[in-house]
Amino acid sequence: MQLTSEITVNLDIEQVWDFLSDPLNSPKWDKSVASVVLPEGSFSGTGCIVDTIAPSGMRQSFRVTEFQPPRFFKFILLQSSTFKEADMSFLLEKVSEGTKITHVINFKLHLRSFMLYPVLLLTSKKALGADMTYLKNALELE
């Protein structure tokens, strides 16, 4: 399944990149992330592992698989009881109004979680749209 959301912010691409590509900024706009841990001590781009801790306390680990400043990055979920696989990416494009941000999430559920598909489809689209609005607001406050 693929979910896509786009927003445009009235900032230059470098400002958006600096904020969005820093995983420590995630709790400022992603409501599913309460905190971020960098197991390697600092963020280094491609290959780096980033752990997120949800407000519920659930921990997830991601690996950055592509990091192309100031335009694109992608990361994969390393292990999940719900998802067989998942990847997320951000594409930044200069537009006349500033910077367009396209966020794409691809995922496949484990067979035992397949009954969740209709619920995830409905709630994920809404949550992704809300997160993009929170991202725009956080960027404009920086």
Image (cartoon, helix red, strand yellow):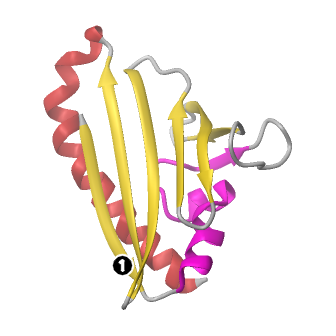
Which one is in front, 131 or 76?
76
Q: Kindly state the secondary structure of the residue where label 1 is placed.
A: strand
Disc 1 target residue: 8
Quarter that holds the N terminus: top left
Q: Is residue 31 visible?
A: no
Q: Is residue 47 visible?
A: yes
| Residue at point 26%, 9% (across, down) | 111
Which one is in front, 9 or 74?
74
Q: Any magenta on residue 123?
A: no
Q: In the image, which residues are magenta? A: 12-37
Residue 132: image location, x then y, percent: 37, 65
Quarter that holds the C terminus: bottom right
| Residue at point 50%, 85% (across, down) | 140
In which image quadrant can residue 96 be found?
A: bottom left
As shown in the figure, which amino acid type bears the numbered disc 1? Thr
In which image quadrant can residue 37 be found?
A: top right
Question: Alpha-carbon neighbours of circle 1 within 10 Å: few (<14), some, or many (≥20)?
Answer: some
Which one is in front, 130 or 46?
46
